[in-house]
Image (cartoon, rainbow, N blue to C red):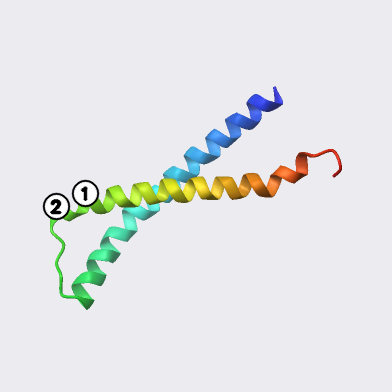
């Protein structure tokens, strides 16, 4: 039962963190990138560029979520051993 509970919480927190990071990145980063490029480089993003930008943001948020979950796992891994 403890193993199933642990797997459930890892899946739950992974999904929650991925959705949260994706929501933040998809909501705020495209407008910041558009403003940055138009202000400093004089480039204007077309609507066609948003698809690849959002796809890149989703892949990077997935990678970031995996890295965060691995760090959390490595941090709490030693606490389950009987010597503590």
Distance from label 2 to label 1 (Cα)? Answer: 6 Å
Asked whether 30 or 69 is in front, the reply is 69
- Point out which mark residue 36 bears: none
Residue 7 at x, y percent in the picture: 60, 30
Q: Do callouts 2 and 1 mark residues in contact (Cβ within 8 Å)?
A: yes
Question: Residue at 67% of width from left, 26% of height from top?
Answer: 3
Residue 65 at x, y percent in the picture: 48, 47
Quadrant for residue 27, please give it. Answer: bottom left
As displayed, is residue 35 above or below residue 57? below
Residue 15 at x, y percent in the picture: 48, 38
Question: Residue at 39% of width from left, 53% of height from top?
Answer: 24
Question: Residue at 60% of width from left, 50% of height from top?
Answer: 71
Q: Secondary structure at mark 2?
A: helix
Question: Residue at 22% of width from left, 70% of height from top?
Answer: 37
Residue lying at the far top in this picture: please name it. 1
Quarter holding the N terminus is top right
Quarter holding the C terminus is top right
Residue lying at the far right in this picture: please name it. 83
Residue that numbered label 2 is attached to? 48
Residue that numbered label 1 is attached to? 51
Asked whether 24 or 80 is in front, the reply is 80
Answer left or right for 69 relative to 47: right
Q: Secondary structure at mark 1?
A: helix
């Amino acid at each position: 039962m403890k193993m199933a509970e642990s797997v459930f919480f890892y899946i739950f927190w992974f999904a929650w963190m991925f959705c949260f990071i994706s929501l933040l990145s998809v909501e705020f980063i495209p407008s910041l990138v558009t403003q940055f490029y138009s202000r400093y480089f004089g480039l204007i993003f077309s609507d066609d560029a948003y698809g690849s930008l959002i796809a890149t943001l989703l892949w990077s948020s997935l990678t970031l979520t995996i890295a965060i979950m691995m760090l959390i796992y490595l941090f709490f891994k030693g606490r389950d051993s009987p010597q503590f």
